[in-house]
């Protein structure tokens, strides 16, 4: 399993499927190559000081290390976006949330009804 490090890779994953949990958001994008699974971690500045953001990032990395390998699909890129709740959440709950989020990403997407266009004033 490799790490995502290039900004372009993070932006590409942002256009893929996503699911939210209380402590993080998981994004996934399928690739057309034969490369290994790649994972990226990010935490925005609104989540606290540098030490708090680093702690969130470390917790997310540890979650991925402990998740079952078959949960992550080959030829896919994943991005975990940390939230402030990741600082105080119980680690076992976060591990269950990650498993649940990965299962949600595997579900076939339901067809959404088209949204009506909003009227704009001239």
Image (cartoon, rainbow, N blue to C red):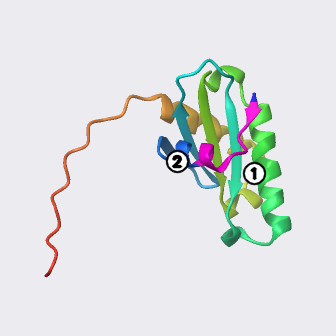
Q: Residue at x 36, y 34 (%)?
A: 109
> Foreground: 37 or 58?
37
Q: Disc 1 designates what residue?
A: 90
Report the number of discs: 2
From the top left corner, tell me how far across and down residue 2 is, in percent: 75, 31
- The mark closer to the camera, 2 or 1, is 2
Name the residue rendered at 65%, 50% in the picture.
Answer: 7
User: Going by the image, does 121 lie left or right of 9?
Assistant: left
Q: Is residue 82 above or below residue 45?
A: above
Q: Which residues are magenta?
A: 2-10
Asked if 28 appears above or below 76 in the picture, the reply is below
The residue beneath circle 2 is: 14
- Label 2 element class: helix
Viewer-side residue, 5 vs 97: 5
Measure the C-alpha gap from mark 2 to mark 1: 27 Å
Q: Quadrant of residue 67?
A: top right
Q: Quadrant of the C terminus?
A: bottom left
Instruction: Where is residue 34? Give x, y as percent.
Output: 62, 17
* 3 up-or-down from 72: above or below: below
Question: Residue visible at 65% across and 54% down?
Answer: 23
Please tell me the numbered disc located at residue 110: none
Q: Position of residue 78 (x, y in %)?
A: 62, 38
Indicate whether 79 appears above or below 23: above
Residue under the image location 16 percent in, 61 percent down: 117
- Asked whether 48 or 8 is in front, the reply is 8
Residue 97 x %, y %: 62, 42
Residue 88 makes an appearance in the image:
no
Give residue 56's quadrant in the image: bottom right
């Amino acid at each position: 399993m490799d790490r995502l490090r290039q900004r372009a890779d993070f932006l590409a994953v942002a256009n893929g499927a996503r699911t939210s949990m209380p402590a993080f958001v998981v994004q996934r994008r399928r690739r057309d190559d034969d490369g290994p699974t790649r994972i990226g971690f990010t935490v925005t500045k609104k989540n606290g000081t540098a030490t708090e953001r680093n702690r969130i990032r470390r917790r997310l990395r540890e979650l991925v290390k402990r998740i079952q390998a078959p949960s992550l699909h080959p030829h896919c890129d994943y991005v975990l976006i940390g939230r402030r709740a990741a600082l105080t959440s119980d680690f076992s709950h976060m591990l269950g949330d990650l498993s649940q989020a990965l299962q949600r990403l595997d579900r076939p997407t339901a067809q959404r009804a088209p949204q009506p266009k909003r009227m704009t004033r001239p």
